[in-house]
Image (spheres, rainbow, N blue to C red):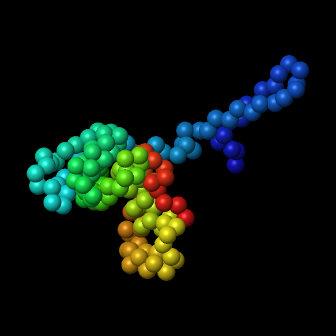
Amino acid sequence: MESSNKIRKESDKKENFVTFHCTIEEHLKPPEKIKMKSITFDDGEGSTHNSYPITFTTWEEANDYLWKKSFEHGYYLKQEFTIEYENGEKYTGKYDVYTRESDKKERADLGAHVMTHNLFYSGRQTPHYMDKESVEGILAGTKPEVKQACADFIDRYEVKVMNQSNIFYC
């Protein structure tokens, strides 16, 4: 079977070097991830005086809102959210934002929260601080279809992580 990559060879007039140009056929490129349309925050725990729902169209705006709100609430903010994607699918969750002095520099990051959750429950990454038995116990109680849904979400949907240090690594 012939390769579907097209390779073109070029060289200079003196034949000193060879450069290969490779183009990948369109059907071999990984599919683009489905883009986020909006992020809506709904009433978190004990926040009845806020004007909810509130919607943003960028990850940056959503993170700025979380950061400001967490300081208004003092030490802790529980925030329910829905991320709607351009294909109409929705991802819902809860983000517990803890306000520490370090948060003034390292801001709340909804994308990192979503990725960390899905990386863990898909079995792709675990936090360095968890022992093997704890991880195995939690994942053993997670249905296979939930694990697959988390893996599919990571593979198909755009999640913008603002600060890579907010995602745990093995």
Residue 109 visible in this rendered orientation of the protein: no
Tell me: 26 left or right of 56: right
**Quadrant placement of the C terminus:** bottom right
| Residue 131, placed above or below residue 93 | below
Tell me: 139 left or right of 78: right
Q: At x 15% / y 55%, what residue is drawn?
A: 47
Front residue of 100 and 54: 100
Tell me: 26 left or right of 74: right
Q: Residue 63: x and y, percent?
A: 33, 45
| Residue 140, placed above or below residue 94 | below
Q: At x 45% / y 78%, what residue is drawn?
A: 134
Front residue of 54 and 22: 54
Q: At x 66% / y 40%, what residue is drawn?
A: 5
Q: Quadrant of residue 38?
A: top left
Residue 129 visible in this rendered orientation of the protein: yes
Tell me: 4 left or right of 146: right
Front residue of 91 and 44: 44
Total of numbered circles in the picture?
A: 0
Q: Residue 110: x and y, percent?
A: 35, 51
Furthest-top residue in view? Answer: 13
Furthest-front residue in view? Answer: 101
Q: Residue 72: x and y, percent?
A: 22, 49
Front residue of 84 and 102: 102
Q: At x 69% / y 44%, what residue is drawn?
A: 3
Q: Quadrant of residue 16?
A: top right
| Residue 15, placed above or below residue 110 | above
Q: Residue 59: x and y, percent?
A: 35, 42
